[in-house]
């Protein structure tokens, strides 16, 4: 009777334990994705590996081969074979991809396109990764505006913020509670408040909805702060279908998504919609936009190939770059021998590694998101 919940817990935990982070990539700058060319917009980016374009230290996998093999043909801190969500949004806005915060001192001109504060592995709360949580990322932004005076009030009027929260808070939460989950025969991660287990032994319930509420509340606080600093258009992503991430589907030979894990993402997304609507009520204007990353991932995975009518990403849940058992994409041993395998043609895979899409994957995800972004032009 509790098989499903067991699976839910199990896969969730598995996701956590193998999770590297979240990131992004992109590819040739397709004209169809291009909005206001030569625009004076600026893009400020907050979040995790789905948007990071170079803020992590060099010890991270994103700085090792084969990351970056498609673009810029070397590892450059993007968690993909190439361009990521940030790059596609910037192109759409008619600007260059904003400079990573870490590289701002080397940049002169480039700061005019905005700045990317996103850092792989982070969340709204502290995670297992020693990177800046979103509060700290916003502090950095605040310094750029109020102390360094890199951006004026007028610059911000014409700016767009992108924030991603792709799941690192949840994987960290599961990890921190793993002892509860693995002790006791009936320790369970419950999606529902009302669930009752009728067995004799006392059970530990870890109620995910409570935590979803704290995560979304913190997202709301963060988005409001970005607005209070002067940004007038703020885009936040829903959580992707994390039950479809290769870190979870690997157990089933990359054949099926885990629908219970996807349900947790759906629950988060539902509450996110509510908190964002509340923010918009207060501003009396649609300042805050949730973009449907969840739907865009699913659409991209099912995308038909125009010529042949077949699915574009033939085996959409199978990642291009896979570590040999016990290793991740990018690992090498002490002799420099590769501990991973890479597919021949990354553009035929949706996923690059355990959690991150390929550049081609991001291209299709962005194509699906684009209609909801037209109002930013
Ligand atoms: C963000 O990180 C700082 C420094 O580690 C910490 O003091 C703060 O509590 C964190 N904020 C949240 C919301 O977790
Ligand atoms: C915002 O507006 C919606 C629709 O009018 C309403 O359902 C919701 O309760 C409002 N939220 C707040 C905080 O006023
Ligand atoms: C399929 O090809 C036709 C003709 O080349 C083009 O007009 C259409 O936009 C393409 N559709 C997709 C989904 O790529
Ligand atoms: C039962 C439960 O949810 N326990 C803990 C799980 O981890 C979080 C964050 O570390 C704690 O706040 C919970 O109390």
Image (cartoon, rainbow, N blue to C red):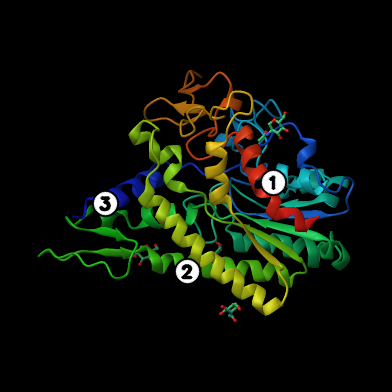
- The disc, 2 or 3, on the residue closer to the chain's N-terminal end is 3
Q: Is mark 3 within 8 Å of ligand 4?
A: no
Residue at left offset 57%, top offset 39%: 300
The spot of residue 349 in percent (x, y) is 54, 29
- Can you tell me which quadrant of the image ligand 1 is in? bottom right
Disc 2 to disc 1, C-alpha distance: 26 Å
Looking at the image, do the residues carrying marks 1 and 3 touch, with CB atoms under 8 Å apart?
Answer: no
Against 36, is 340 above or below? above
Disc 2 to disc 3, C-alpha distance: 25 Å
Q: Is residue 320 left or right of residue 26?
A: left
Disc tally is 3
Residue of label 1: 86
The spot of residue 14 in percent (x, y) is 35, 44
Residue of label 3: 4
The spot of residue 56 in percent (x, y) is 61, 44
Residue of label 2: 214
Against 163, is 340 above or below? above
């Amino acid at each position: 009777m509790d098989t499903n919940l067991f699976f839910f817990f199990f896969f969730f935990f598995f996701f956590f334990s193998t999770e590297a982070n979240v990131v992004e990539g992109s590819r040739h700058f397709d004209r169809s994705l291009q909005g206001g060319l030569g625009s004076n917009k600026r893009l400020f980016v907050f979040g995790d590996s789905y948007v990071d374009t170079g803020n992590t230290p060099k010890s991270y996998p994103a700085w090792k081969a084969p990351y970056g093999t498609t673009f810029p043909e070397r590892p450059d801190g993007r968690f993909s074979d190439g361009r990521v969500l940030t790059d596609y949004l910037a192109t759409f806005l008619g600007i260059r991809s904003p400079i990573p915060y870490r590289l701002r001192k080397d940049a002169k001109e480039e700061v005019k396109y905005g700045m990317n504060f996103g850092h792989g592995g982070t969340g709204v709360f502290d995670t297992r990764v020693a990177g800046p949580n979103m509060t700290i990322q916003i502090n950095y932004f605040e310094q750029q505006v109020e102390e360094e005076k890199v951006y004026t009030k007028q610059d911000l009027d014409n700016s767009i913020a992108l924030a991603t929260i792709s799941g690192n808070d949840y994987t960290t939460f599961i990890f921190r509670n793993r002892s509860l989950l693995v002790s006791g025969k009936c320790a369970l991660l419950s999606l529902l408040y009302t669930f009752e287990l009728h067995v004799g032994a006392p059970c530990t319930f870890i109620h995910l909805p409570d935590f979803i509420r704290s995560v979304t509340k913190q997202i709301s606080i963060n988005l409001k702060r970005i607005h209070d600093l002067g940004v007038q258009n703020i885009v936040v992503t829903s959580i992707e279908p994390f039950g479809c991430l290769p870190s979870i589907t690997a157990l089933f030979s990359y054949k099926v998504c885990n629908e219970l894990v996807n349900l947790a993402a759906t629950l988060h997304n539902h509450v996110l919609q509510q908190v964002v609507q509340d923010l918009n009520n207060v501003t009396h204007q649609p300042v805050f936009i949730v973009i449907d990353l969840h739907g865009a991932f699913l659409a991209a995975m099912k995308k038909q190939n125009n010529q042949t009518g077949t699915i574009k990403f033939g085996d959409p849940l199978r990642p291009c770059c896979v570590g040999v058992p016990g290793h991740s994409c990018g690992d090498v041993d002490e002799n420099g021998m590769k501990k991973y395998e890479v597919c021949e043609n990354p553009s035929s895979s949706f996923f690059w590694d355990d959690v991150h899409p390929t550049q081609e994957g991001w291209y299709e995800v962005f194509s699906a998101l684009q209609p909801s972004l037209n109002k930013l032009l």
